[in-house]
Amino acid sequence: MGVISSGARSLTTEQLMTRAAKAAAGFSALGVQPGDTVALYLRNDIAYFEANFGAAQVGGYPVAVNWHYTEDEARYLFEDSGAKVVVIHADLLTPPVRRALPAGVKVLVVPTPPEVVEAYGLDPATAAVPAGETNWNDWIEGFAPAEADPTKAGSTIIYTSGTTGRPKGVRRPPSTPEQTALFTGLLYQCYGFDLAPAEEITTVTVGPLYHSAPNAHGGMAARIGANLIIQPRFDAEDLLRLIQDRKVTNLNMAPIMFTRLLKLPDEVKRKYDLSSLRFVAHAAAPCPAAVKRAMIDWWGPIIAEY
């Protein structure tokens, strides 16, 4: 059984899935039906996976929202996706976001955890759920876990960056069992999860969960029972510390992260034992040959592009 951790907080895979099943029951009680959308306006946090898995369990489509959006951008996404529920961190429920919320949408507020407050230098006062709002943690505890129905499983909607006009989200039809098996097998290879039993894998979510690769990588790690560490915000030296202290075996990264790691002073790079690493996948952008060569020289021939 794996452990999902963020800062000083942790849940076992079983505990996470139980909370997700409670969220599923709650979403059903709010009227979320197969094909409906639940917007996740969240930073990197355990609650992201609870809400994501819970919405998918009832056939809903979790919509990962870029929490950097302006008021106009947020309003567009909420309306375009047809979100029936918005799950949001307390510090992100600002006046502009409140104005962007469609009339009648149900808002569930997640207390912003201490590690996120620290990583972003937030005012601790903004981390608490505002008076009169529904606290995510209290809300899900009011439901018994829903029974899982694999035939209802929805697919996450990831909106594009909007480089040509407005961002666009694709609502894919539910996968057939054959498609699910094929896609899962491909991701296993992409992330190196096929190299060891799940309980022997320890990985880190290093990118924002509103991006497709961190979303898929973190979600798969949590589902299969691997040990998943959620980094609230990418920090190059902190990642080296996590690799050493938590014996990280697998990573999924973007080339910009390699660049930031390589810019660390040599004495910092030599300070940490990285020998636990077995497989490092990268994608999201072209990786300059010199950068990849420098990473291989440092970390060894364990870096694969997909």
Image (spheres, helix red, strand yellow):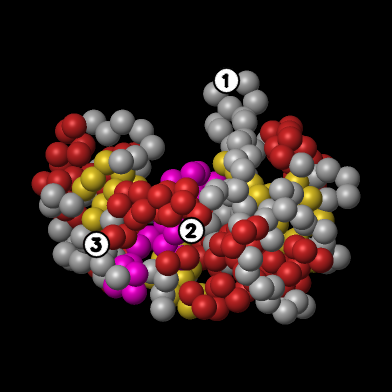
Q: Is residue 69 visible?
A: yes
Labelled disc at residue 122: none
**Marks 3, 2: nearer the viewer:** 3
Viewer-proximal residue among 227 and 92: 227
* Residue 213 lies in the magenta stretch: yes
Crowding at label 2, few (<14), some or many (≥20) Cα neighbours within 10 Å?
some
Q: Are marks 3 and 2 in contact (CB under 8 Å)?
A: no
The amino acid pointed to by label 1 is: Thr
- Quarter of the rendering occupied by the C terminus: top left
Left or right of 73? Residue 234 is left
Looking at the image, residue 288 lies above or below residue 28: above
Q: Position of residue 286 (x, y in %)?
A: 31, 31
Give the SS element for disc 3.
helix
Looking at the image, residue 127 lies above or below residue 180: below
Crowding at label 1, few (<14), some or many (≥20) Cα neighbours within 10 Å?
few
Viewer-proximal residue among 230 and 35: 35
Left or right of 216? Residue 261 is left
The amino acid pointed to by label 2 is: Gly
Query: What residue span does the magenta drawing correspond to?
Result: 198-222
Q: Residue at x 66, y 73 (%)?
A: 147
Q: Residue at x 16, y 64 (%)?
A: 275
Residue identifier under label 3: 195
The amino acid pointed to by label 3 is: Leu
**Marks 2, 1: nearer the viewer:** 2
Q: Position of residue 124 (x, y in %)?
A: 63, 64
Labelled disc at residue 219: 2
